[in-house]
Amino acid sequence: MSTLQLSLAIIGGLVLALIVAYNTWTSRRNAPKRALPTEYDPAAEPAQRLEPGFDAGATGAMPPSDFHGLDRGPEPSEHTVDAGDALQLPVPPFSSERRPGLDPLIDVIASLQPEHVVSGDAALAALPPTRRAGSKPFAIEGLNEATQQWETPAPGQRYQSFQAGVQLANRMGALNEIEFSEFVVKAQAFADAINAAPDFPDMLQEVARARELDQFASDHDAQLMFMLRARQAAWSPGYVQQNAARLGFVAGAMPGRLVLPAGIQGLPPVLTLGYDTQAALADDPEQSAIRDLTLSLDVAQVHRSEQPFARLREVAAALCQAMDGVLCDQNGQPLPAMAMDPIAADLELLYDQLDGRDLSAGSVLARRLFS
């Protein structure tokens, strides 16, 4: 082999090696970023889905534990608490919002007066099988003879009067004549079963009130959604979960959904982070490529004391920095930081208008109306 042939062979081998190295580097560069192994990674464990619901009484169930063979600590008789120390214990948060029941502000309410006191068991047996009139929630409450409080009928209790209600409006629209008629039919059937005399309000007035409330709700309903887009390499689901977990997000009720819980357990989440459901359900999620996330805020569902929009901006900035992403609008257009300031000002005005209507964001009535 001549010197020229040897040189050409060496050059060809080097070129081939460079091509292989470049392809390998390109593949690694474009591969989805994966979660880094840590001593403790909340996203790596089977996550208990604790997404809050709309009812303040909803709580997540604790997973079963096996205490066999574990040190349970001292016996109760051996453990005492000083009265002075007990006064220093933290007090759980207290909510002073309205009772989560029928309210004339957003409900049509019909009184049902029985001839005699009705047992809770009889009332439960007479309830209609469905709790909706068309697309509107329908409910019946009883005035407890012992507590003198309105409540959902319960077994073992006695009720001296009842009231039936249907919601005036929700995100499906205003109560219409057909839904009002269905409400009357359901309430009348219940009244007949417990031998009560119903007193229904005027349909035309209530339908007009429903339209006015629906117009107000439509003008003050804000659901913000932003997109976080990868600048270069895509993300794997585990990588997204790991970075979101550092900011307080937990697994939601659906695959591809993470939520930032509210300060009080049982309330709706402050923020929601979503990505492709198919990527979350893939056989090997770490091979799934995610190029964009959605970060959303349902304004009416979250109390302003949580400062949800400020937290949204903080979360978006932290994720973009940690994951090499860029904040965009719903159409994928990058958003400068200054574009967020007018939104914050508009939200403060919106909060004030909701407060003025006794429908403060995050309250029971607001969560019902904007649902």
Image (cartoon, grey):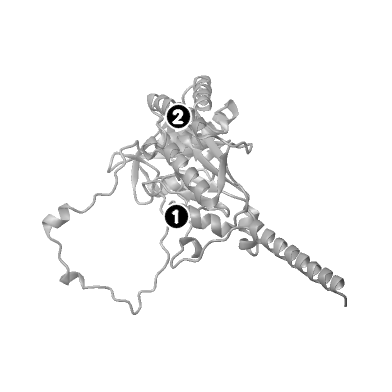
Q: Measured along the vertical axis of the image, is residue 215 above or below residue 244?
A: above
Looking at the rendered structure, the secondary structure element under dot 1 is loop
Q: Quadrant of the N terminus?
A: bottom right
Look at 69% across and 64% down and name the residue there.
24
On the question of residue 46 being in view, the answer is no
Residue drawn at the location 55% of the way across and 39% of the way down: 226
Q: Is residue 260 above or below residue 22?
A: above
For this view, does 32 lie left or right of residue 53?
Answer: right
Q: Are marks 2 and 1 in contact (CB under 8 Å)?
A: no
Amino acid type, callout 2: Leu
Residue at the extreme front: 3
Q: Which mark is residue 48?
A: none
Identity of the residue drawn at 42% across and 34% down? 361
350 and 242: which one is in front?
242
Q: Which residue is mark 1?
A: 246
Residue 242 percent coordinates (x, y):
50, 58
Image location (x, y in percent) of residue 161: 36, 36
Q: Give the number of the mark in front: 2 or 1.
A: 1
Q: Identify which amino acid the numbered label 1 is placed on.
A: Arg
**Mark 1 neighbour density, 10 Å: few (under 14) some (14–19) many (20 or more):** some
Q: Earlier in the sequence, mark 2 or mark 1?
A: 1
Total residue callouts: 2
Q: Secondary structure at mark 2?
A: helix
User: Does residue 177 appear left or right of residue 198 in this picture?
Assistant: right
**Residue that carries the numbered disc 2 in the rendered image:** 347
Q: Is residue 161 left or right of residue 282?
A: left
Q: How busy is the neighbourhood of tag 2: few (under 14 within 10 Å), some, or many (20 plus)?
A: some
Quadrant housing residue 305:
top left
Q: Is residue 205 left or right of residue 290?
A: left
Report how far apart the C-alphas of labels 2 and 1 lie in the structure: 27 Å
277 w.r.t. 339: above or below: below
**Residue 349 picture location, percent across and down:** 42, 25
